[in-house]
Image: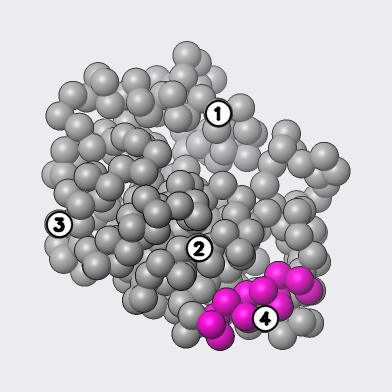
Amino acid sequence: MALGRVGIWGHDIADDTPRSREAAAELDELGYGAIWVGGSPSVARAENVLAATERLTVATGILNIWEHAAADVAVQAKAANEKYHGRFLLGLGASHGKLVKDYAKPLSAMREFLAGLTAAGHAKQDRVLAALGPKMLELSATEAAGAHPYLVTPEHTARARGILGAGPVLAPELKAVLTNDVAKGREIARGHLRFYFQLPNYTNSLRSLGFTDDDFADGGSDRLVDATVAVGDETVISDRLRQHFDGGADHVCIQVLNDPLPVAEWRTLSGLIQGHS
């Protein structure tokens, strides 16, 4: 699956509207390698982006395994790849206990879902897993093409590469606020992070990197905000990309927080693609 080095992660990009379709087509023209569709999307939602583009890979970031049957997803993924010439990548995740009614044993649930996909003919190389901890990362290496960690730091990327080994794909998400006003940018970042700091999967992962309860208070300390969101100009965001690549990332997908559909920022950041190719 061709992801390129730099991609875009977003929710509204997959809306079935002229504005979203035009934005997706422009991302394709700008040279981004992939678009990751956020918000627990279905395969059908990802197809909105596939239909609007011609070259880049479109991935679910991530499809919630609790909301779908593996056999159905396998059929849908196969159809999407046949229709759009192999440009669809299935990103899967086990979500969070606070968001799923009958949440239990996420690692076992993921193993079962992957077995169902394989039994239905879905190839391991056509999927990646949202993985933070060691066991899910190990599963990403053996039962998928690799991992798509979300809300992570370059230190996590280096740790994940050590667990995955040299072969599997490592495609972390990078949050960014493109701005010359760092204080305002941190406000935007905190508004985004507050939701995620209510979810133990993320806070436990960040605690394992040395952050404490004090860091999670009031929307996040400057230290935590700056570690998880690249706030600043193109140079700041480019440096964070480099840190992830130095840590072993194959591909980094940027989630720009300035706006739900930040086309102007995507245009500006497209200048970084060649520098990290």
Report the residue marked by disc 2. 48
Quadrant, the C terminus:
bottom left
Labels 2 & 1 near each other (Cβ < 8 A) = no
Q: Earlier in the sequence, mark 2 or mark 4?
A: 2
Q: CA distance from mark 3 to mark 2?
A: 26 Å
Q: Which residues are magenta?
A: 71-83
User: Label 2's element?
Assistant: helix
> Residue drawn 35% across and 26% down?
188
Q: CA distance from mark 2 to mark 4?
A: 21 Å
User: Looking at the picture, which amino acid does disc 2 mark?
Assistant: Asn
User: Looking at the picture, which amino acid does disc 3 mark?
Assistant: Gly
Q: Earlier in the sequence, mark 4 or mark 3?
A: 4
View extreme (front): residue:
18
Q: Earlier in the sequence, mark 2 or mark 1?
A: 2
Q: Earlier in the sequence, mark 3 or mark 2?
A: 2
User: Looking at the picture, which amino acid does disc 1 mark?
Assistant: Phe
Labels 2 & 4 near each other (Cβ < 8 A) = no
Q: CA distance from mark 3 to mark 1?
A: 31 Å
Q: Mainly helix, strand or loop, the magenta region?
A: helix
